Image (cartoon, grey):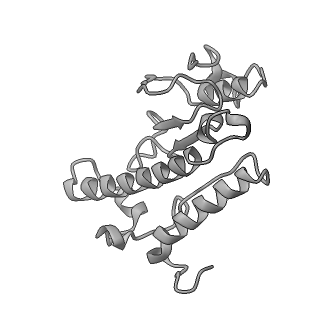
Amino acid sequence: LEQGVSLDNDGIPKISTMQADLLVNAMANGMARVATLQYTNSVGQARMRWLDVHEDHHHLSHEPDNNADAQEKLVKINVWLCEQLAYLARKLESIPEPGGQGSMLDNTTIVWTNELGKGNSHSLDNIPFVLLGGGLGFRTGQAMQFDNVAHNRLWLSVAHAFGHHIPVFGQEKFCEGGALALS
């Protein structure tokens, strides 16, 4: 760890950059093909003071929808997380693949998600998923909404894109309708 980088909440911005750089370097050097980047944990109590958010993220996520102050702070947090995702994507895009076959981003798929659709109700409905990169041949540059569709079908689509034509991912009842048409 670089000198001066704290291992507490205030160090998260620098640690985020360091982790993304490490992830990209490991992939570029063939040391990893799959990686996970997670910011704290669901009950980690992160306080994002660099965003002028002094309450912990977990507590804010449980506030009612009509708490405008909490919702504004959650938007700030999500914008910051999106900026971290953009940083990672730009790093991948900046590295050419051998033989001129595009960039690492062209041959990578990033899945960005949250564990819940709504923190205040612990809903598993409408969980947001963002897919970036061209690694699995999915159509990009679009926003899609799948009402009342279990996210198991998304993971089934990812498995199929990797060449694993499994009939279900997780519980069979959540895979009715099969893989999603994403390519």
Q: Please state if 21 lies on the left or on the right of 78 as rendered.
A: right
Provide residue 110's location: percent of width, then percent of height: 58, 41
Q: Please state if 181 lies on the left or on the right of 169 as rendered.
A: left
Q: Residue at x 65, y 24 (%)?
A: 157
Quarter where residue 80 is shown: bottom left
Tell which residue pokes out farthest to the bottom in this image: 3
Residue 45 visible in the displayed image: no
Q: Is residue 124 above or below residue 38?
A: above
Q: Residue at x 53, y 35 (%)?
A: 131
Provide residue 151's location: percent of width, then percent of height: 56, 30
Which quadrant is home to the C terminus?
top right
Quarter where residue 20 is shown: bottom right
Q: Residue at x 60, y 55 (%)?
A: 37
Q: Is residue 33 above or below residue 4?
A: above
Residue 174 visible in the displayed image: yes
Tell which residue pokes out farthest to the top in this image: 177
Could you tell me how many numbered marks the image carries? 0
Q: Residue at x 53, y 81 (%)?
A: 5
Quarter where residue 137 is shown: top right
**Near-viewer residue (180 or 124):** 180
Which quadrant is home to the N terminus?
bottom right
Provide residue 175's location: percent of width, then percent of height: 64, 21
Provide residue 81's location: percent of width, then percent of height: 43, 54
**Near-viewer residue (69 or 144):** 144
Q: Please state if 103 lies on the left or on the right of 143 as rendered.
A: right
Q: Is residue 182 above or below residue 14?
A: above
